[in-house]
Image (spheres, rainbow, N blue to C red):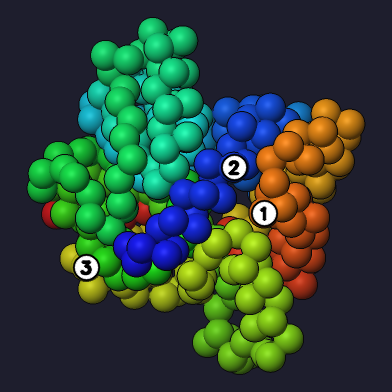
């Protein structure tokens, strides 16, 4: 990963992760609110439901050794380790996240099962054919080379293993809506700037890359409607008294991220931002 972007992402999560854990809890990803987005759930339960629904959707019921690519403070990693009694690895660019995830593994008495390290997803420090599940929940949007990212996921996956990828996408451009408009590009550009993203692509583009990488049994879906209510809850929670005090201590970049949460909500409302899913197997 290019050094300036690597540093920006690390610094963003170093500065903000403590606050987000305080406000959101251990799961730093979307929640699932039913196919129609109508379930009335607290945010943490919706986030756990997203993990469970992804496993059901990808038909994954047994895991022995997995990697969580972009693990945050270990929410999904520890959950999967407990659920499957599996060995797990979590990687992140943020030393603060790695330290907190390791601490939480000890709190859960899972330090012998689940380990964390600072590592680049485009150059993973693992042997070929090592994991029977590669789990990537909202980290693909940070990757500056989507092809290299999926190539690495394929490389470390065991034959017969499964990739589950959930990531921010923009709308498909091969439909009647056509190419992205100048206004849509401006909207995306603001999201990129605030959240340290190089760019996002459409779900059909991810599918094409997965095919080129050698994956088979590729399954895709768009869960934008199911997760969109998440941002209303995040915006509400980001501006209570506790969160405001935390924001003031976290620095300008975190404050700007909080002030820009509406970019994501409006992106979903206009159909520009999509929550894309891809599941695939390695032969």
Whichever of callouts 1 and 3 sits on the residue coming sooner in the sequence is: 3
Q: Is mark 1 on a helix, strand or loop?
A: helix
Q: Where is residue 259 in the image (x, y as percent from the top left)?
A: 80, 55
Instruction: Find out whether the residues at labels 3 and 2 contact each other: C-beta distance under 8 Å.
Output: no
Instruction: Find out whether the residues at labels 2 and 1 contact each other: C-beta distance under 8 Å.
Output: yes
Q: Position of residue 258 (x, y in %)?
A: 75, 50
Q: Where is residue 115 in the image (x, y as percent from the top left)?
A: 30, 26
Q: Tell me if mark 2 has few (under 14), some (14-19) or many (20+) residues whose alpha carbon lies within 10 angstroms of its own.
A: many
Q: Nearer the viewer, residue 116 or 69?
A: 116
Q: Tell me if mark 3 has few (under 14), some (14-19) or many (20+) residues whose alpha carbon lies within 10 angstroms of its own.
A: some
Q: Which residue lies furthest to the right in this view?
A: 241
Q: Where is residue 80 in the image (x, y as percent from the top left)?
A: 40, 27
Quadrant showing the C terminus: bottom left
User: Which residue does the numbered mark 2 point to in the structure image?
Assistant: 15
User: Which residue does the numbered mark 1 point to in the structure image?
Assistant: 253
Q: Is mark 3 on a helix, strand or loop?
A: helix
Quadrant showing the N terminus: bottom left
Q: Which of 193 and 168 is in front in this view?
A: 193
Give the Cα separation between the discs numbered 1 and 3: 36 Å
Nearer to us of marks 3 and 2 is 2
Q: Which residue is drawn at 61% across and 91% down?
A: 178
Is 267 placed left or right of 215 in the picture?
Answer: right
Q: Which residue is drawn at 72% across and 61% down?
A: 264
User: Which residue does the numbered mark 3 point to in the structure image?
Assistant: 213
Counting labels gives 3
């Amino acid at each position: 990963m290019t050094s300036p972007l690597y540093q920006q992402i690390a610094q963003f999560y170093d500065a903000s992760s403590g606050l987000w854990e305080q406000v959101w809890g251990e799961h730093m990803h979307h929640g699932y609110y039913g196919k129609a987005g109508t379930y009335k759930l607290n945010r943490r339960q919706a986030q756990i439901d997203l993990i469970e629904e992804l496993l059901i959707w990808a038909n994954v019921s047994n895991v022995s050794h997995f990697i969580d690519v972009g693990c945050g403070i270990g929410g999904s990693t520890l959950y999967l380790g407990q659920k499957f009694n599996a060995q797990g690895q979590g990687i992140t660019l943020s030393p603060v996240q790695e330290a907190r995830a390791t601490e939480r593994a000890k709190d859960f008495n899972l330090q012998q099962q689940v380990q964390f390290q600072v590592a680049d997803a485009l150059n993973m420090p693992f042997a070929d054919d090592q994991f029977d599940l590669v789990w990537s929940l909202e980290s693909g949007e940070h990757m500056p080379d989507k092809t290299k990212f999926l190539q690495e996921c394929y490389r470390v996956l065991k034959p017969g293993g499964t990739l589950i990828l959930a990531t921010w996408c923009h709308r498909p451009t091969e439909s009647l809506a056509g190419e992205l408009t100048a206004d849509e590009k401006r909207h995306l550009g603001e999201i990129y700037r605030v959240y340290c993203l190089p760019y996002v692509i459409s779900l059909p583009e991810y599918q094409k890359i997965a095919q080129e990488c050698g994956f088979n049994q590729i399954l895709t879906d768009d869960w934008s409607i199911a997760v969109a209510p998440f941002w209303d809850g995040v915006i509400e929670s980001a501006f209570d008294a506790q969160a405001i005090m935390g924001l003031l201590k976290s620095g300008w970049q975190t404050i700007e991220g909080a002030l820009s949460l509406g970019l994501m909500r409006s992106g979903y409302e206009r159909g520009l931002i999509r929550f894309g899913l891809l599941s695939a197997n390695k032969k």
